[in-house]
Image: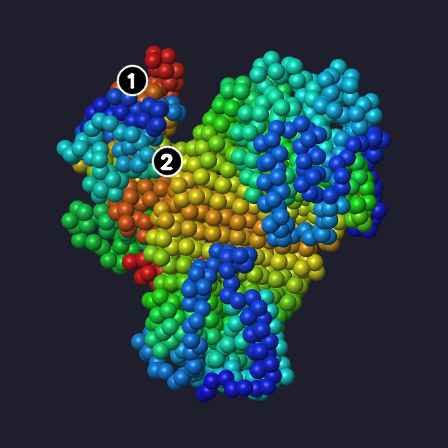
Amino acid sequence: MSDNLIQEQIKQDYAYGFVTDVESVRAPKGLNKEVIQFISKQKKEPQWLLEWRLKAFERLQSMTEPNWQKPQYPKIDYQALYYYSAPKGFKEGPKSLDEIDPEIKKTYEKLGIPLNEQKRLAGVAVDAVFDSVSVATTFKKKLEDIGIIFCSISEAVQKHPDLVKKYLGSVIPLTDHYFATLNSAVFTDGSFVYIPEGVRCPMELSTYFRINASNTGQFERTLIIADKGSYVSYLEGCTAPMRDENQLHAANVELVALDDAEIKYSTVQNWYPGDKEGKGGIYNFVTKRGICKGKNSKISWTQVETGSAITWKYPSCILQGDNSSGEFYSIAITNNYQKADTGTKMIHLGKNTKSRIISKGISAGHADNTYRGLVSIHSKASNAKNYTQCDSLLVGNLCGAHTVPYIDNKNSTSTTEHEATTSKISEEQLFYCKQRGLNQEEAVSLIVNGFCKEVLQQLPMEFAVEAQKLVSISLEGSVG
Amino acid sequence: MLSIEKLNVSVGDKKILEDFNLKIGKGEVHAIMGPNGSGKSTLSYVLAGKDGYEVDGKIMFKNENIVELPADERAQKGIFLAFQYPIEIPGVFMNNFLKTSLNAVKKAKGQKEVDVVEFLSLVKQHAKKLGIKDEQLGRALNVGFSGGEKKRNEVLQMSLLEPDLAILDETDSGLDIDALKVVADGVNALRSPNRSFLIITHYQRLLDYIKPDFVHVMVNGSIVKTGCSKLAQELDKIGYKEFQKAI
Amino acid sequence: MNTITDIKEVSELRALSLNLFNKHGYPTKRDEDWKQSPLNNFLQDNKQLEIYKTNNDSINEKVFENFKHNKIIIVNGLVQKTDFIGKDKDKLIITTIDEYYKKNNKNLLKLFSNKKNPLVTANNALATSGFYLEIKDNLDLPIIIYHQYNSKVDQKQLHQKNYILINKNSKASVFEKFTNENKKTFISINTNIDVEQNSHIKNYILNSNNTENCVYRFKKVNIAASANYESFIFSNIVKTIRDEVEINLNQSLAECYLYYTQFLKKNENHEIKVKINHLAENTQSYQFSKSIIDGTAKGVYQGKIFVDQIAQKTNGYQLIKSVLLSDQCTFHSKPELEIYADDVKCSHGSSSTSLNKDELFYLMARGIPETQAKRLIVQGFLSEVVEKISDENFKNYFLKKTEDMLS
């Protein structure tokens, strides 16, 4: 089949691009002290947090946006953005699901997110973030019974200030880099999770993010703390309506794993990628970092990145505790004019620390896909081990696939291994599938899913099916 | 020749050998048989002096406790281990390796080291007996060798180094019947009143070709039964279950 | 043979380059390409080194190899003597770079084209010496270029600019043997190599310094259709060296093979930087590097394969292995791929480990003492790269060097 014919094939549009008609309360446009005070006041925050935000804002004045990444983007006018938007009538967070605006409820139903506990998917507790605020957290009660705290970060600030104060900014410091600092100044909401000592969280915790209002940046902040010997699996999904302008999403996610604890963090990111000519779409500039603070702790990142005009994130692990381990499994698919620059950092500080990186980049259309990663083994990290594998798949010859790994080893008892390949779907593979009765689309989908298998396997069941579909859908319309 | 007394070996918290005792006299051939995980290979590594084990007890070799000695000095004193999995070392060529090894052992024994010409004729002569081609001697150590070639290479080294005690760790594994015969013939040719053997094996097969004087059954890190070569045939019929139950 | 005279066109290009250099200054770790470069510190500490004016300096004959070869002896950047043998006399042209400029003054831009690399622009601006070498046919014997830098250049900086042209259908082995006997010197050597259609060049380099100096070698190699460039760099005793090469595979069936071995001890630093641009269909590149790092030494390997949109059927391969022997040494690697064509086969692998304990045990169990066993393993490890050299004589030469270096 000729490439042209393939290009003509099914053009599936972004399925989540509707706008929900809710009135919203917004902070005044622009970025300044007053707006930050407004946000803080709206959320009835204690003084220390306001001061913390202002410190970040002050710091921001002397910082510049990073410029080493591959995707370039037009200058963002930070004064033209709204930094806070909440559905009108939203006060402190609904007491029960009945209080939620029916329009918003409908939105989540359309997205397939079960806010209604009766119709819930078994075993997934959801925190839903609509623009800037958290609108609902399901299953709260059930979790509370075993001591798990799962709520919006705003609520955590009110009810669990000690935990928030202790850990907020402990993994991503205020001064980290431009977007992280911006987030620290203006973050509006996000999820908070605390798993007490020895507790194994019995269900998947999940947050669904949605950007609805226009000209609005979303700056959520997530903080997950797994106390000694605990375990939690957390899922994150994202969508946004179709708009012509680019919208900024600059989230910070911090994970803390204490002795023998394990955190599994999975993301399916399907923000609006822009149209076929590359107009519009989300700038997904996200800082995610976890620290394996305690011995034998483990943090595992899994991500399926199919949306956004520009994806720019490096979920990282600081392996501080002895015998701790970090994992990063990633699928990044870029199509049309999408750009992704993503990867991870594994910082080995403790003895016998292990890390494993599996990255699969798929590039189609005019897209650009970069894996960028750092494996750093410090001189005290005896017997550390790293294994990295990054594979790229190119579909068509107008796209690019890049691999930029940095490997620094300062300990002679440690081992690093890195492998990378770049290939395309071979005619032989396609022929073989077709000979067995599959059509072009099915064959490509099968091969791409096979290519991604190692990563898909890492996702919790509930997500794996969705992710697999997404992988196929994302490539439709340009696939060869 | 060899006397192991109250040998205890562990890795971390895991005990592998427990109060292990064994005596091997001059010229004797002993076989140790046992199920997987009974500690047979560990025993061979510990006798040869591999690092990474916590070792307690005595290993008397020719009336000297060698338990603290590094692997090279034990080899120089006459202990030879034929590895179960001979390691591949790319870039290190067979000839160079064999010559270095032979001269290190000769030097330690106070013998005259061999020069290149002597060495080549010596190694070819031994290689020929084992059916090892000259071409193989020009390759990197064990790299790209088949299972049979690797095992033959182990026997070649044994015949060059002329040890006093040869330990054969699962030398029969991965060999077809013809290769097994060649290897066994090689070993039998080395039998002498001054040389002792310790043959570690899972199956009795190899013992059809190399007749042992004593057979020991090893389970969970200790010898649970000792007998003559008939014991091996018995084991082949009844398996190890009986002995494992007893513990 | 004289220092570079002022030819108008050259002066203009120099001025332009100086401007560029002044704008940027010496590289620092903030420059992505120089992040881990061991040169940074030396250059920052020695900004004011006087520029060496070339002179007729005496030749050190002790380092001459005793096999038959064509000789080019360059002392402190200046060609001092040549000795070509038999028919090879008619197949070789060597002049100062200055002579070349005079004869080709309209065609010099490509020798000064680099605008981004601060040290290359410095070299463009400040080079006071260099040679032009043309190979016109198949050579019977190898060429050895003896690069000798003696104490006359102590505490000075020396910039040298060379151009090597390999004509169509030629074949040659060019061995560059470096001897450095000087202190606190910065030596920057910039060599352009054009490999024309269907030519085969083998370029071998031996680093063997004994002093506290800093060397930057930058090579730019253009490879035409069905031509082939093979290089091997053997680093034995170095202090602070950066070996950089940029290769353009300009036409189809162009190929390059780059081999490196590093054996770094004490406080030695060696950085390798490779950029390979696949710019045409059916081109092939191969990189294979092995490093042994000991003491407080630092090894760096930055390798990038770029594949242009039109460079379909590209084959790019890169393998970087290092073994760390001490607690204080470091190895940085950055094996990069930037790919815009879909029908390509590109892969890279990189590993960094300690000496394999099982290998060591195997050798010791055969009676080989620990130090000797380690040496054998190291020798074997490095020899794997040396074995790839396609010129049999030089392969044996470097295998011997590897053995000698370790004993």
Q: Image point 22% across, 35% down: which residue? A: B68
At label 1, counting other C-alpha atoms closer than 10 Å, the crowd grade (few under 14, some 14-19, many 20 or more) is some
Residue B224 circle label: 1
> For mark 2, what is the residue?
B84
Q: Nearer the viewer, residue A56 or C64?
A: A56
Q: Image point 70% across, 48% down: which residue? A: A339
- Mark 2 falls within which chain? B
- Mark 1 falls within which chain? B
Label 1 with label 2: CB-CB less than 8 Å? no
Q: Is residue C159 left or right of residue A366?
A: left
Name the colouring of the figure.
rainbow
**Percent of width and height locating residue A116:** 76, 18
Same chain for the residues at labels 1 and 2, yes or no? yes
Q: Image point 51% across, 44% down: which residue? A: A375
Q: Amino acid at mark 2?
A: Gln
**Percent of width and height locating residue A256:** 53, 30
Q: Is residue A204 left or right of residue B25?
A: right
